[in-house]
Image: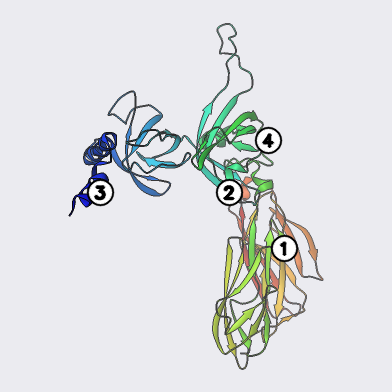
Amino acid sequence: MNFIDKYRSRLIIAGGNARDEKIISTKQLINHVFRDDPNYYVVPISGVDIEARIYSKNTGNAPFDNSRNKFIQFLDPNYLPLLGSYVFWNNRYWMIIDVDDGDTIQNTGVIRECNYFLRWVNDRGDIIERWSIFHDRTRYIGTHGTQHMVTGSMVAHIWLPKDAETESIPRDFRFIVDNFEHAQAKTPATYRVTSANRVERTRFGGGLTDLTFTECTFNPQTDCRDELIADYFPRMRDYSLDLSTPHNIEVQLGGTFSIQILATVNGAATTKGLMFISENEDIAIVDQEGVVYGVTGGETTIKVSFHSKIIEIDVSVVLAKTQYQQSIHINGSNNLRLSGVSRSYSAIFYDNLGNEVQDIAAWSFEYNGTSGIPGFIEVVSHDRESNVITIRAIGGVNGIGQSFILRATNAAGTSSESMEINIVSF
């Protein structure tokens, strides 16, 4: 190695001046002793394992104290965590609430223990869950004799990681923030968003959503104490996907077969968001109306998806179709929510070739081995032309967990099909 190569090597190892040399040597020393530090941990940060030192400023090398804030140093000086990232440490979730990137040797952050698991329903009807930091910011304005302090309306803040879901929370959005046991026995503590600060704690691509709350009134008609979610019932989307076509179908080569399927949102039929996909279009293709075309002899699978619901249909493309026995299928959900929306059930009839045919359904009920409409069920409507019956669950909480049989029989009384329906709370 000539002197130029040696010089370049020295620059890489020790830096080009005394300051660089000091920084590099300090980093090397820290890296050498870092893992021997009693406060050294490998902690998951947003799902990635990171080497870090966690400590309390007021107690030195004693991280297990009562302070809700901890300092966190990172072994890798090039690692800079995002504000709002979760740190799972000491069997609890913590959130990075501050980052100091001004240290030449190591980057340091501040983490605070998350104290509430916040849940809400977004505009798409999805339940969103985030660990959060809840803190009371009520201003106490005086006393009244020897009694407790007199206050104005309670004001609280909650910090959440800044992401697509938390950024879409508007003013006047409502949350339940309460202990589960208390919420079941007493009126759940409910809050309304009065302002959202999404700017102040934003750095390096990360950030916190700082929501200001004030107390509001719990509404048992819209809020769900069991789920600890405010405005649960009007926002929740109850998606269902019910297949009336058999799960195994045969399509004649060169022929077609129409898949009969019902997608509903909160009991209302819809085709928006319904998708049909063939796993092997060389054998069978399917359009977005659910019509399957037999292309080549063989077997494939048709996947029908509707939001998180997925149904698979096995398809065989054959020269001649197999003979089937006459059958009935009941379309509808197996769950009926107590005091919830009405649900409709339809009967679809098939001939011995599996083709849909017209017939008239006679509906009947059975509960605990006895025929007749159960006392907790109300028939809202019965459309005989379309073979649709609409029912809802009524009565008190004693109905929760009950089940009954709904049966459809053809006009000739030669074929019938039944469905067990359960009464649920949500």
Instruction: Return the residue at label 1.
Output: 270
| Distance from Cα at disc 4 to Cα at disc 2 | 18 Å
| Distance from Cα at disc 1 to Cα at disc 2 | 21 Å
Task: Give SS at disc 4.
Answer: loop
Q: Residues within 10 Å of mark 1 (few under 14, many from 20)?
A: few
Q: Nearer the viewer, mark 4 or mark 2?
A: 4
Q: Which one is nearer the viewer's eye here, 25 or 250?
A: 25
| Distance from Cα at disc 3 to Cα at disc 2 | 57 Å
Q: Nearer the viewer, mark 4 or mark 3?
A: 3
**Quadrant where the image shows the N terminus:** bottom left
Name above or below for residue 274 compared with residue 302.
above
Q: Quadrant of residue 35?
A: top left
Instruction: Identify which residue is drawn at 60% across, 55% down.
Output: 402
Q: Residues within 10 Å of mark 2 (few under 14, many from 20)?
A: some
> Quick one: label 1 or label 2, which is nearer the N terminus?
2
Asked whether the viewer can see residue 344, the reply is yes
Task: Give SS at disc 2.
Answer: strand
Disc on res. 172: 4
Q: Which one is nearer the viewer's eye here, 259 or 34?
A: 34
Left or right of 35 in this view: 359:
right
| Distance from Cα at disc 4 to Cα at disc 3 | 62 Å
Instruction: Identify which residue is drawn at 71% across, 77% down.
Output: 349
Residue 425 in the image, given as x and y percentages of width and height: 61, 49
> Quick one: label 4 or label 3, which is nearer the N terminus?
3
Disc on res. 127: 2
> Quick one: label 4 or label 2, which is nearer the N terminus?
2
> Quick one: label 3 or label 2, which is nearer the N terminus?
3
Disc on res. 8: 3
Disc on res. 51: none
